[in-house]
Structures are given as structure tokens and as C-alpha cells.
Amino acid sequence: MIKRILLPLSIFLLAAGCSTQTKVLEREVGDFDLKLGTAPTRSMAHGLVEPTTAGAFHGGLDLTHASGWYAGQWSPSAGITNGTSLQVNSYAGFLQQPMDDSLGYELGLIHYDFPELENRDRDGYYAGLNFAGSRLGMALNAAPGRTDSTLFLDLGSVTPFGVGVKVKYGSYALENPHYLPGNRSIEMFNDWSLNISRPWLGIQLDLSYTGSSLTGAECEAYSGQNAQCDALVMFRAERQLY
């Protein structure tokens, strides 16, 4: 089933990824809400389980039923540029979101598919609570030789400045220790990230900080969710052209 969807999804990625503007096309199909876009539409599945960074060509689809059940696919990379490979994440779950901003919940599962790589496919499970625009979630990712767990907190828009705040903390346990010189080994490590964002005069401002528990030579064992092992502060300003 997954491989039958890969071809049309890849064609969509080619067309959508060439635009400098992130787009989401939405349409109602009976009791379902269908979304196609180059930006993630399922914040818990995308922000909690998988790193938010994406390649130059990316996109996906999301289908939601009026009852709260949903399913979709998201590709962080179409594997078109050098040094990248095709990845398609297929997910399904249930979201219970009251209309009066009272406490709601979400749970689901996700499958990471790497058609061009061997022994890389893996499964993940996630669950979370949402209340008045804020979300708290946890995820467990089972992969060959390791177990990853993630804690995700999205405070939404924090008043009075209208600043969006997201915090992510990951823990990684390796079945086979990574050995370092001096008879040292690494069986577990952690990483974290903080993202602050705010729209200003039509420009999206983003400030992020990432880091991990590994330092120096230990970083050769790093394989977490951040772009790099060492502490990194990054500022980005993005404006849509049209």
C-alpha cells in the first residue's frame, strides 16, 4: 500500500517543493477533510515524533474524519538532492479536541519508510494532551538496536507578546554501546531544543537553541533529533513572496 502511494506523492513533492512558499491546500470530501501541502499539518505527529527540519523537496497529505480519526503521509525528503534519500512517514491516529478549549487528547502510531535504504524502517507511537492551544506529548520510537523516547511541549502563543514557544527533550538508549578511546563507552544520551517564534510585519521570526549531553569526542556517537551534537543557536527570518 505504501509503495503504491510513493509515486504520486513524489510527483507532488517535485511540484510543490520548487516553491519558496509553504502551501496547504484543503478540501472537504464527504465527512473527511483532505489537506495537501508543503508544510506539516499534523503538529503532534510531525513535531513530536520526527525532527521538524526538512529538505528542499518535501510535502504530504492528511485525511481527517469528522469523528476525530485521521491518517496521512509526510515526506521530509524526496531524495532528489545530493546526500539525501527518499523518506515517507505514514501515520494514523485519533484526536479528541473539544470546541470549548477544555482538555483533549491525541494518540497514534507512525511508520518510517526508507525505500532506498536497507534495515532503516521503524515504527513509533505517540500520545498527548491539548488544552487551550497548548500541547504536551510523549513518543516512543522502536528501531533496530535502539529505543528513542521524546517529550514535547508546545505552549502555543504566549501572551502578552504573542510569542510561540516549543520545547523538545529526547532520550536515546543504545543496545550496542558506542566505544570511545580510553575504554569509555556510551549506552545512552539526551538532547533538547527550544524554539521561539513570532510574526512581525509579515515576516516570521524564529530563534532556536539546541544541545545534547555529549561533548567533544563523544559527539561521534550522536544520532539524535538535532542538526548537530554541540550547542547551536540559530536565528531565521522568513517572508512569503506572494
Image: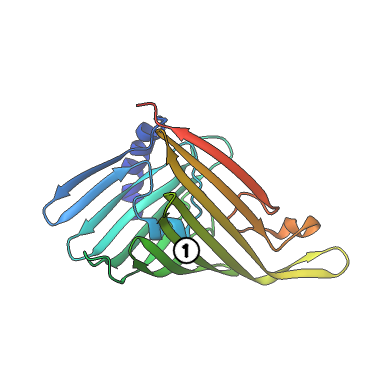
Where is residue 45? Give x, y as percent.
40, 59
Where is residue 12? Give x, y as percent.
33, 38
At x 34%, y 43%, the residue is 9
User: Furthest-left residue in view?
Assistant: 30
User: Furthest-right residue in view?
Assistant: 182
Q: Which residue is more in the foreground, 98 or 90? A: 98
User: Furthest-front residue in view?
Assistant: 160
Q: Which quadrant of the view contains residue 99?
A: bottom left
For the residue marked with disc 1, what is the amino acid? Leu
Where is residue 140? Give x, y as percent.
49, 70
Identify the coloring. rainbow
From this view, report whether residue 19 is shown above or below residue 40.
above
At x 39%, y 26%, the residue is 241
Q: In this view, does 241 lie to the left or right of 180?
A: left
Q: How many marks?
A: 1
Q: Which quadrant of the view contains residue 144?
A: bottom right
Q: In this view, does 157 lie to the left or right of 61?
A: right
* Secondary element at tag 1: strand
Mark 1, other Cα within 10 Å: few <14 / some 14–19 / many ≥20: many
Q: Which quadrant of the view contains residue 132?
A: bottom left
At x 20%, y 52%, the residue is 33
At x 79%, y 56%, the residue is 216
Q: In this view, does 202 lie to the left or right of 216?
A: left
| Circle 1 residue | 153
Where is residue 195? Give x, y as percent.
53, 52
Tell me the quarter of the image containing the N terminus: bottom left
Q: In this view, does 169 lie to the left or right of 106?
A: right
Tell me the quarter of the image containing the C terminus: top left
From this view, report whether residue 34 is shown above or below residue 49.
above
